[in-house]
Image (tube, rainbow, N blue to C red):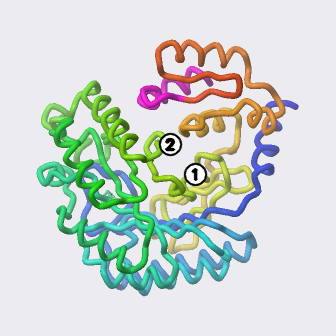
């Protein structure tokens, strides 16, 4: 089979239920490091946006006529919309995409009093909460310009549990200005005390068009690369010890709690993204909406980004996962062997302790995850 024909064959082999991502482009205040598309809003705008989003969900529901088994309300800060609007969005998605036994995630900012919002959201079907904790050290939260403190996090987790949400994920950030291994351990202890089912760990990346990006690096007091590597490996050590499975570069979960929605991205399965700055992978094509709420209100269509499902993309995404890339799966998808040349490259990294190579496949080690970009580039 020719390589050119591979993408179409690839995505048609994985016609599973869809994942739906709905973006809410509002935040109460912009965090100093954040490059996501979000604006400040008010009730009038939240209402207008909810109506536009529901309309678009209905439009694609009819057009695609396919069931979904994950719904992810991300942002921005979707919890700002309040329970009633979140309920309306979830009900519309259920009406058009079935969502039987689906994983339905809501991202939330613990700074806001969410008791009522979470109760209504849970009644509408939200069963997973993703909470932006980031750190338990007040000075670190301040440097990130986060609005919450530890009491807010404790309150929100207990409100979510009381509402019946039994799957809670906490975000933790590493590489924060001034962060040390000792302050990281304090944050890890705090997060573990909340007993979450899932923890996402992100290394702070300085994006040029952010307040951090516009600040001279010597003024930011960022941990250097070696310290950041130590912070990452310490996080892996602590979370592995506590029984979390490191199933993806940035994600740890208790048994059975891996994010079903995010796994669709890494497994190259299809998903529909709606809202400004959201991305879709459908019918072998990757598309995206512009970073503009006005364009979205105007009803503009998503733009073509690239063909998806190539062998390069498959290698890149599979190597993000603990399970790595299986040679038989690769052959069944692309109709050709994973080349000996690539296996020889992987063996070189294995000698450095960065990869594992077996008869059946290749995967990155935790140290390999730290330099995954270079290894994946070399393999491709
Ligand atoms: S709350 Fe989240 S999405 Fe909003 S600015 Fe902060 S990091 Fe970005």
Residue under numbered circle 2: 248
Asked if disc 1 is less than 8 Å from ligand 1, the answer is: no
Q: Is residue 220 above or below residue 191?
A: above
**Does the magenta run of residues contain 375?**
yes
Q: In this view, does 65 lie above or below 10?
A: below
**Does the magenta run of residues contain 55?**
no
Per the rendered image, the range of residues in magenta is: 364-380
Report the side of 333 relative to 121 (left or right): right
Answer with the quadrant where ligand 1 appears in the image.
bottom left
Residue under numbered circle 1: 263
Q: In this view, does 206 lie above or below 151?
A: above
Q: Is mark 2 on a helix, strand or loop?
A: strand
The x, y position of residue 50, in whole percent, is 47, 80
The x, y position of residue 312, in whole percent, is 66, 32
Mark pair 2, 1: CA separation: 9 Å
Q: Are marks 2 and 1 in contact (CB under 8 Å)?
A: yes
Q: Is residue 48 visible?
A: no
The x, y position of residue 56, in whole percent, is 60, 75
Which residue lies most toward the right here? 1
The residue under the point 82% across, 44% down is: 9
The residue under the point 17% across, 38% down is: 182
């Amino acid at each position: 089979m020719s390589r050119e024909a591979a993408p179409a064959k690839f995505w048609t082999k994985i016609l599973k239920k869809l994942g739906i991502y709905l973006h809410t482009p509002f935040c109460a205040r912009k965090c100093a490091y954040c490059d996501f598309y979000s604006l400040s809003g008010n009730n009038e705008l939240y209402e207008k946006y909810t109506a536009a989003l529901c309309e678009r969900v209905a439009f694609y529901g009819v057009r695609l006529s396919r069931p979904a088994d994950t719904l992810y309300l991300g942002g921005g800060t979707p919890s700002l919309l309040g329970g009633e609007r979140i309920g309306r969005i979830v009900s519309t998605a259920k009406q058009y995409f079935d969502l039987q036994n689906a994983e339905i995630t809501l991202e939330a900012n613990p700074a806001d009093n969410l008791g009522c919002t979470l109760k209504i959201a849970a009644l509408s079907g939200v069963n997973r909460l993703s909470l932006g904790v980031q750190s338990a050290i007040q000075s670190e939260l301040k440097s990130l310009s986060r609005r919450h403190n530890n009491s807010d996090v404790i309150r929100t987790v207990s409100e979510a549990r009381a509402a019946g949400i039994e799957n809670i994920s906490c975000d933790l950030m590493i590489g924060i200005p001034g962060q040390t291994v000792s302050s990281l351990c304090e944050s890890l202890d705090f997060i573990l005390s909340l007993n979450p089912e899932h923890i996402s760990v992100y290394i702070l990346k300085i994006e040029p068009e952010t307040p951090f990006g516009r600040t001279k690096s010597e003024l930011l007091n960022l941990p250097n690369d070696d310290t950041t590597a130590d912070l990452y490996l310490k996080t892996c050590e602590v979370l592995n010890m506590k029984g979390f499975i490191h199933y993806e570069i940035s994600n740890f979960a208790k048994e059975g709690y891996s994010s079903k929605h995010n796994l669709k991205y890494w497994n190259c399965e299809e998903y529909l993204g709606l809202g400004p700055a959201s991305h879709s992978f459908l019918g072998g094509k990757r598309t995206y909406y512009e970073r503009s709420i006005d364009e979205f209100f105007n009803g503009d269509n998503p733009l073509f980004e690239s063909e998806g499902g190539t062998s390069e993309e498959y290698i890149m995404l599979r190597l993000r996962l603990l399970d790595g890339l299986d040679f038989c799966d690769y052959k069944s998808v692309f109709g050709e062997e994973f080349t000996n040349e690539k296996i020889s490259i992987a063996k070189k990294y294995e000698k450095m302790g960065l990869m594992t190579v077996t008869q059946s496949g290749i995967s990155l080690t935790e140290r390999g995850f730290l330099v995954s970009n270079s290894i994946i580039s070399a393999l491709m």
